Amino acid sequence: MRSSLRSKLVPFLLLLCSGVSAQEICNNAIDDDNDGLIDLNDTTECVCDGIIGGGEVESILPNASFEDFDCQPTSYSQLDCADGWAQATGSTSDYFLAPTYMPAWIEQPLPGGGNGCVGGYFCHDYMEYIGGCLMQPMLAGESYSLNMSVAAFEIDNFLSNTTLMNLSPVNVTIFGSATCPTWPTPVPLCPGTEPGWSELGYVTYTPNESWSQVTITFVPTFDVQAIMIGSPCTLPPDYPSVSDQWLAYFIFDNLTLNETSAFGSTITEAGEFYLDDLELTGHPDSLAQSYQWFYQGVALPGQTDTILGVSINDLDTGWYQMVSYYDTICVISEIHIDPICVPAVIGNAPVTSCDPVNFQLQTLSDLSQVIGVNWDFGDGSSDTTSAPSHQYTEPGTYDVTLSLLSEDFCPTDTTYTALITIYEVPEPTFTADPLEGCIGMTVNFTNTTGTLTGNCAWSFGDGGSANICDPSHTYNQADTFSVQLTVTSPQGCTNDTTITEMIIVYAEPQVSFTSDTIAGCTPLTIQFTNTTPANQVGSVLWDLGNGTTTTTDNPSGLYTDPGTYSVSLEVTHPQGCSAEVTVQDMITAYGHPVVTFTNQPDSGCYPLEVQFANTTDAAFTNTCAWNFGDGGTSDQCTTAHTYTAPGAYTVSLEVISPQNCDGDTTYADLITVFDHPQADFYFGPQPTDIFNTYITFIDSSSVDALQWNWSFGENGALGSSTQEHPALHFPDIRGLYPVQLVVTNVHTCTDTMLRFVEIEGYYAVYAPNAFTPDGDGVNDTWRPLVRDQEDAYYHVTVYDRWGHEVWATNDPAQGWDGKANGGSIVTGVYSWKLKTRDVVGNFDHEYLGHVSLLK
């Protein structure tokens, strides 16, 4: 890079051109008066006082060259150390101040020869701004100019290393606010999109590592109290994002801000001298009548425009002046173009390696104008060729410096920090504990490599692996195993070591056992058999789960309590390895049912029906077997049984559980069945007839009868009695009348006797001899009345005096209404004939008679 190229702005005075000698023409590049002084160099004859002096333009920005500070920065993100300046947003801009923090990649000397400058990133997703409040506000409607020195770099995220600048032109932008805010502001990215901030103006700048002078001229539309300077809100597409390797970084110095009229005439440059594209542009403060360019005070014939192509006209370094001619005055602006300084640019990318590196160095600098090259490899050796190769063999970090000397004897250099890094390769070591044991043993491995351990990878020899540095591993097979540890350092360097046959794992007994049964009712005896291969058995230890342990090879166990029992067998191999097998809940001892039942009732007279119900826990009930004590049984868990004979009966119930375990309960003399009394009686007189119906009853029941209940007639229609020997008048109607006696003993047992009282009948016929069917309800019909007859044999016929039948019926209850064959009633005497059979002697009878029909 060019180490000393800079532009210098010299203010001017507008003075009357006076005292010009007739012998020296001041703009023709000729020594007209032969005094050895040409044009402006003849200061006695070519007087234009703008070339000499006047005061510099004051800046309304505080600490415009960043020379004043509250603290001295030691790293990036410390802009707040500079007086009057602040981190403008949450993105932290930087303050560079010699000697505490001034990276080598910043071109020296700084513009104006000071010690401080500032900088910030221009990235699509990360923009840094410098901010400050003005010493006096910029007024709306006035023209203002910001003149400043700018340089740009493509640099890493730590402001350590740079690469060749290859970014497109960008608008360096100034933003303004009507108030002085609290710094930093809450602007998330670019102030131009946030309330309270507005873009004031910008200058399009072609990024270059060397200092350039740029000017932004603008007219604010409001009074401005504070400004931010930095990236535009929208960057060109080729600019990086913050995650890229190389970022865009801009530095600023000598910020002069004031009204445009305070600057007068100025000269700005575009392009680079050493790139053959340098162009100068004059900026007069008002339109002049003519212009003339000078080099080192000597007029450049034909260069009378405001633009001078330095490279196109093959001009050299040095002082350039532009004179603006007015009616009576002239104004001189001048700028100095420094000698060619070729920037030293290292073209290599950083290299890291775990192995020795044969490194081919290269530069991106244009060596066509370079007369001297020197490489410092950072390991005490150097080279003066343009693209040397160098072998790095020892671990370490190496800074490489490239120094160039241009044809103008301008020295430049650059140091690439940590260009080469050779990392130390780890030497893995480790320990293990224990080193031998039985199958299933867990070995604890410890990495003892030391600080070079970043990551570990283990191979345990049995197909197992791990990626932690101090693992534990369980070996599940018998063998001898080699173990390998591969260590990767934090820098990615890898090495491994293997210890052969490090771990010895012995086989364990293949423990197994059986039992003759696994379930049964208590007390349950189980015979166990050790089925472990005999050559693997040194000793045994059984835990039968019932509180019994034994060293007998094939023990038996007694289980007296219901429950499930886990059985364990530990076998110790003759070589000392032990293995244990536990069969969870192997043995199940079932309890017996606790038999209970209910009965209702528990006593009564025979036949006595008793309801029996099993109340044993349902979980213990599968089948039931009853014995009722009288020879009767049942297999129903809820049942009924009838006792048919008196006595005391013992009842038992046996219950079989679902597991075929039995239980029983017996209750002696549970059921008591009482005998009945014997009911009997006799009565008289018997037989009797309707003329003698008073009957006396004599009880002849068994002596245990204590109560008598007599019922006379159907359903007691003739009465009842509780006397022991009652008497009763029966109806004077022939018939058999039931008499029932119920006797009760002390146990409320009863017996019943039913007998019949016979009242013999008296056969008789009554036939009226006259009737009056006149409808008065008295004697309106005629019918014979027969006592104690067989109704089925009843038949009566009525004849008129001629012997004709006029009425007949078989219904003893039907009477004749006097109508002859249903016709009219005719008074007179009529004959009748009655046929009937008595129920006393069962004889047939026939009667004849007369009846008078009267009206």
Image (tube, grey):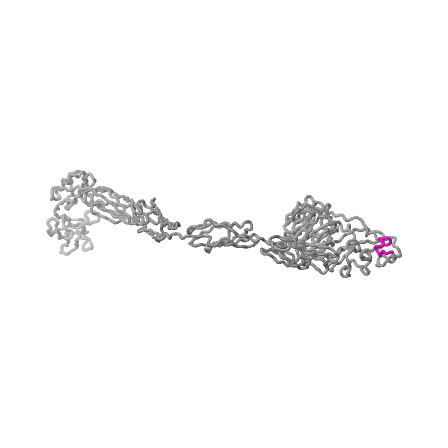
Judging depth in this view, the residue of 249 and 306 nearest the camera is 249
Q: Is residue 42 magenta?
A: yes
Residue lying at 46% horizontally and 51% vertically, measured from the top left: 473
Q: Position of residue 747 (x, y in %)?
A: 20, 39
Whether residue 721 is visible here, answered yes or no, is no
Classify the position of the N terminus by image quarter: bottom right
Q: Is residue 843 magenta?
A: no
Judging depth in this view, the residue of 418 and 235 nearest the camera is 418
Whether residue 541 is visible here, answered yes or no, is yes
Judging depth in this view, the residue of 688 and 16 nearest the camera is 16
Tag count: 0
Quarter where residue 549 is shown? top left
Q: Name the main secondary structure of what is drawn in magenta.
A: loop
Residue lying at 44% horizontally and 52% vertically, measured from the top left: 504
The residue segment tinted magenta is 35-47
Is 843 left, or right, of 664 in this rendering?
A: left
Q: Position of residue 153 (x, y in %)?
A: 67, 54
Q: Position of residue 83 (x, y in %)?
A: 70, 45
Is 165 left, or right, of 855 in this rendering?
A: right
Q: Position of residue 152 (x, y in %)?
A: 69, 54
